[in-house]
Image (cartoon, rainbow, N blue to C red):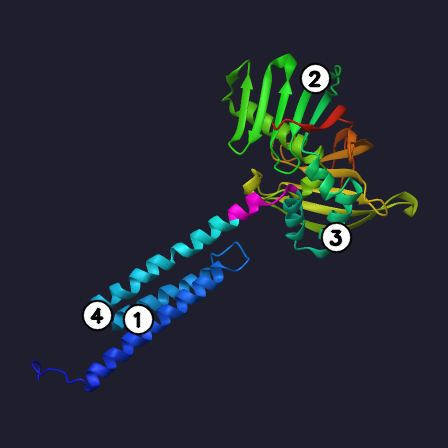
């Protein structure tokens, strides 16, 4: 009987009420779950499994309800969908409010490999401490860069300004009137006061920036963002007189790296001093070829210890030299607490 009115206790009305109550109860339970996740300490909220379950629930529920009730459920869901964005914004604000030492500690704690995390912390303390690196502020170094060529060496003098925590830097070559800046706005290259748009020149500038920011601030630079650090075993020297622990850093696109970019550092057992590194970077002058870097002349700079000489030599995958030294970088003078780059 199509025209029959439903009584208050009719089975049809009871079934419809049960369906609506069930859907609304699930909506309330989901909202409580979203709010509890947003208030949790973990900043990352995006969870594909939860999102998939929520989507499936909406599809199944709305298929059984009339259009007005679908609107009643979907409207709160749109409001709750903004909760993850708010949580992410609050987490970002909390990180921005952390001290520089807290940021370094958070990065060390984020290293998943237990052995690598312990070695990193020991190395940072051996070369100062997380507090010394944080309080040192920006480093300013006067640098002599020498390229060893068959027809004679080619030398240039540069001034580097590097923030060990943020990775921002400014590289100046006064004789060429060239300035390279990398900060939160990206990479900028100027020569003679004019912006440089040439792709090869910018790629070379990116290689110089990576060398300066990664090696000048070792071992703190190993705690940079957008990378994975793992323990890579030990290496025994000739006659078993010395042993090194090795850490491998794999870079990700977040820091401008390409697939295959990596850095392996050798830390001397007992002192945790970094004696050498094997790098494979995609920017010129490395262009994906392995390069061995011997670091020595570790000297104090305030409360920090920084290597004053780097010798870069072409090498094989095992780190053995395949030719003579190609570049020598000398840190002539270095000061802490310089103006930000």
Give the SS element for disc 2.
strand
Mark 4 vs mark 2, CA separation in Å:
76 Å
Image quadrant occupied by the N terminus: bottom left
Give the SS element for disc 4.
loop
Q: Earlier in the sequence, mark 1 or mark 3?
A: 1
Where does label 4 land, which residue? Answer: 66
Residue 172 appears left or right of 47: right
Q: Which span of residues is magenta-colored?
A: 92-100
Where does label 2 land, which residue? Answer: 156
Residue 154 appears left or right of 22: right
**Is 314 located above or below residue 77 in the figure?**
above
Mark 1 vs mark 3, CA separation in Å:
50 Å
Q: Which of marks 2 and 3 is nearer the N terminus?
A: 3
Mark 2 vs mark 3, CA separation in Å:
39 Å
Mark 1 vs mark 4, CA separation in Å:
10 Å
Q: Earlier in the sequence, mark 4 or mark 2?
A: 4
Task: Name the mark on residue 61.
Answer: 1
Q: Can residue 327 be seen in this view?
A: no
The residue lying at 10 percent from left, 82 percent from top is: 5
Give the SS element for disc 3.
helix
Task: Kindly indicate whether the residue at mark 4 contacts the one at mark 3 (C-beta within 8 angstroms).
Answer: no
Q: Is residue 211 magenta?
A: no
Where does label 3 land, which residue? Answer: 118
Residue 76 x/y as whole percent = 32, 62
**Is 120 located above or below residue 339 in the figure?**
below
**Predominant SS of the magenta segment:** helix
Residue 111 appears left or right of 189: right
Residue 77 x/y as whole percent = 34, 61
Q: Is residue 255 visible?
A: yes
């Amino acid at each position: 009987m199509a025209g029959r009115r439903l009584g208050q206790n009719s089975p049809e009305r009871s079934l419809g009420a049960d369906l609506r109550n069930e859907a609304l109860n699930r909506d309330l339970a989901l909202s409580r779950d979203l709010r509890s996740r947003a208030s949790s300490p973990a900043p990352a909220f995006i969870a594909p499994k939860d999102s998939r379950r929520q989507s499936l629930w909406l599809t199944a529920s709305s298929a059984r309800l009339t259009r007005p009730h679908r609107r009643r459920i979907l409207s709160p869901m749109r409001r709750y969908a903004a909760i993850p964005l708010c949580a992410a914004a609050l987490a970002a604000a909390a990180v921005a409010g952390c001290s520089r030492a807290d940021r370094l500690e958070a990065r060390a704690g984020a290293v998943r490999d237990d052995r690598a995390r312990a070695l990193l912390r020991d190395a940072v303390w051996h070369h100062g401490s997380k507090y010394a690196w944080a309080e040192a502020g920006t480093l300013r170094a006067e640098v002599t860069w020498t390229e060893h060529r068959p027809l004679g060496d080619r030398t240039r003098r540069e001034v580097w300004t590097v923030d060990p925590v943020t990775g921002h830097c400014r590289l100046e070559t006064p004789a060429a009137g060239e300035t390279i800046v990398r900060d939160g706005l990206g990479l900028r290259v100027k020569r003679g006061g004019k912006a440089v748009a040439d792709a090869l020149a910018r790629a070379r500038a990116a290689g110089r920036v990576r060398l300066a920011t990664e090696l000048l601030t070792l071992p703190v630079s190993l705690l940079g963002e957008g990378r994975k650090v793992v323990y890579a075993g030990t290496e025994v020297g000739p006659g078993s007189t010395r042993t090194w622990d090795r850490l491998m850093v794999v870079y990700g696109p977040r820091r401008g790296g390409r697939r295959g970019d990596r850095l392996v550092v050798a830390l001397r057992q007992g002192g945790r001093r970094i004696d050498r590194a094997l790098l494979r970077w995609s920017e010129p002058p490395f262009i994906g070829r392995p390069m061995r870097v011997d670091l020595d002349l570790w000297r104090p700079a305030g409360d920090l210890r920084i290597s004053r000489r780097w010798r870069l030599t072409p090498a094989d995958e095992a780190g053995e030299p395949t030719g003579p030294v190609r570049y020598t970088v000398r840190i002539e003078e270095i000061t802490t607490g310089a103006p930000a780059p």
